[in-house]
Image (tube, rainbow, N blue to C red):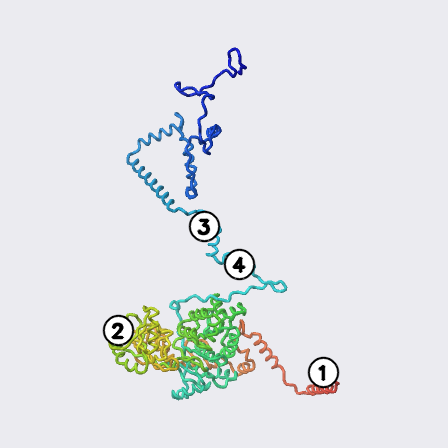
Amino acid sequence: MFHKGGDGKPRGFGFGGFSLGGKKQDQPVHSLSAMPPPPMVNKHGYTGLQAITQTALDATYGIPRKRPKTEEEYFEQEDDEEPSSSSNSNALAYIPAPGSPSWDLQNSKNNSDSEEDPLDAFMAGLDNQVAIEKEHAEKMKKKEAKGIREDIENEDDEESYYRYIEENPLAGLEKEDSEGELEYDEDGNPIAPAKSKYIDPLPKIDHSEIQYESYEKNFYEEHEEIAKLLPNEVEELRNKMGIKVTGPAPPKLVASFAHFGFDESLIKAIRKSEYTQPTPIQAQGIPAALAGRDVIGIAKTGSGKTAAFLWPMLVHIMDQKELEPGDGPIGLILAPTRELSQQIYTEAKRFGKVYGINVVCCFGGGSKWEQTKALQEGAEIVVATPGRMIDHIKAKSTNLKRVTFLVLDEADRMFDMGFEPQVRSICDHVRPDRQTLMFSATFKKKIERLARDVLTDPVRIVQGELGEANEDVTQIVLVMPAGPAKWVWLTSKLVELLSSGSVLIFVTKKANAEELSNNLKLKEYDVALLHGDIDQNERSKVILSFKKKEVPILVATDVAARGLDITHVKTVVNYDIARDIDTHTHRIGRTGRAGEKGIAYTLVTDKDKEFAGHLVRNLEGANQAVPQALMDLAMQSSWFRKSRFKQGKGKKMNYMGGQRERPGLGSEEMYSGGAAKSSIVSSMSHSSLPKFSGPQTDRLSAMKSAFQSQYKTQFTAATDTAWKMASREKEAEKERIRKERKKSRWDNS
């Protein structure tokens, strides 16, 4: 307690100080008053008792502090590393109490480890070592990949959205037929969106798996008056009519309908249609079509080409069996527009009723149900647009198995309207040995390519001043034996060829071109070489020197077959044949330019028999003579021999018998049955025809005409004509009153 002092006691609490516990006996005991506090520096740099107190209260006092991590080290460490390291540093290892379950479990594990097989222990050590090395390698790999931040480099939501939009550009867009794009008229009624007009073509078909029946397509017998005409007279007659004819062995043209050999029924229908004489396209096209030949007719609209393919089609159809249930048409006519289809349909129906032939017209915009019904009932002739015909074939309303007479009218317009894939697919679905007639107003490259693919040895008829083959180039094809015959011919002929102008020699391979060029240089000829391995600058120099006539001979591969326009090239020599007929055409087109004359030599050997057929057709198309040796070589090729047209005497048109079930052309069987029946036929022409159904068959008009004819037969002409006189007097009185009436200034009468 506190003493005030006195009685020998000092003033104070009565003690001098206190001692610290745990100190050794030999150390002196210091009191607070006698011992100053030790100078200490805290972590903030301050000294004093306050710093000591704060340091003592710190939980981490006495534990060494870690170095603060940099930004790179912070982002490199994994999430599960930090808590494990901190827990290992702050928490002590757990020591189980003796006798506890954990103590017993640890003792049993130690005992089992001691009894472990040495080999197993060694293998376990190896596994641990591999795991440690693997972990170390992963850490080293992460250290090497410094500077990569996963939160930046990895794809986030926005970046993944942008990538999805790039990969799916139409994602989220409304379809064309969706309700969101509907337009409305003034009354608020929705307007149906326009549908896509593109129609998928028909799939390919394998004709080798289909068994087709044989048929006859040559019905032309040359009239004796036409047979007497000499070739120069025929050519003079063609020039007078303004037509040009090319192709292999075209028939002579005719001058009258009597020369066609039609039967009396068809001739009467032709006269009734007010035809006086054949038009130029009919005079040449009908004999070729009746002879079973493929025809290309190039003429403007209104030239009479519709009748030029309809009349031979009727003869062609009448020679075949009648249609059975499920059969498709025999004659198919493709036209680009519905207006032209209806026009052709009207003409076909007019002449088809002579023989009781059904005609159906199928076009877009018409009732598909009625067209399907008519096709299923059977029609020998179908006039259709390509798109609607494909629709009916896909719907199995009809098929093309019996089509043997195919007509493509206004093919250039169908191509301009984008119907080329559809037209080609329809042609591919018709049997390969069909007869095909194609008419066009122009002869563009697309039409020429289609004609080459679809037609076989066609007769090309051109009316008017249209594109014709280049007659300035004379083509000469020489068939030579294998060996050095080509080189011998070239060296013996080269001086003569150079006397007329520059010479361009085409070789197929680059190695052969270099070999031929070197051999000609050894013969002391100035030769330039041009092939694909020469760079562009060198090519330009070679072509420029050849144009300037510095070099008279140019040996080239097919790189010079297109676009080389040099007027002084007088001779082209195809030392090797071209890869295809198109390249051959471009080769020979390097001469005969700008109105100049030129000669193209083609050297052919026996191994070129497959290409010889193409050369034959190229010469026939250009109206040039075909050497007999080349024809014999071409006939050795199986494809050319099978596709070559067959010459010979045609079948008579009024043929009766065979497999046909219908009456032949000119047969009286169709109208037999006595005088009473013939009088009914003459008075009621429509009632004698077979019953038609479906679209465009004029069923209603036929019934009206029949009832009208029947109704008129019940009356006779009146003998009393007084009513006519009375009506005339009334009309005269009205006219007199009208003239006497005073006219107003507004009356213009």
Residue 43, how many percent across, how many down? 45, 33
For the residue marked with disc 3, what is the amino acid?
Glu
Is tag 2's residue or tag 1's residue first in the polypeptide sequence? 2
Residue 219 - label: none
Q: Mark 2 = which residue?
A: 518
Q: Determine if residue 52 is in view.
A: yes
For the residue marked with disc 1, what is the amino acid?
Asp
Residue 654, how many percent across, how many down? 44, 81
Q: Nearer the viewer, mark 4 or mark 2?
A: 2
Residue 155 - label: 3
Residue at image coords 48%, 53%:
161
Residue 156, how many percent across, how many down? 47, 49
Q: Are marks 1 and 3 in contact (CB under 8 Å)?
A: no
Badge 3 marks a residue whose secondary structure is loop
Q: Mark 1 = which residue?
A: 747
Is tag 4's residue or tag 2's residue first in the polypeptide sequence? 4
Q: CA distance from mark 3 to mark 4?
A: 28 Å
Q: CA distance from mark 1 to mark 3?
A: 90 Å
Residue at image coords 53%, 14%:
5
User: Dot 4: few (<14), some (14–19), or many (≥20) neighbours within 10 Å?
Assistant: few
Is tag 3's residue or tag 4's residue first in the polypeptide sequence? 3
Name the residue furthest top.
7
Q: CA distance from mark 3 to mark 2?
A: 64 Å
For the residue marked with disc 4, what is the amino acid?
Glu
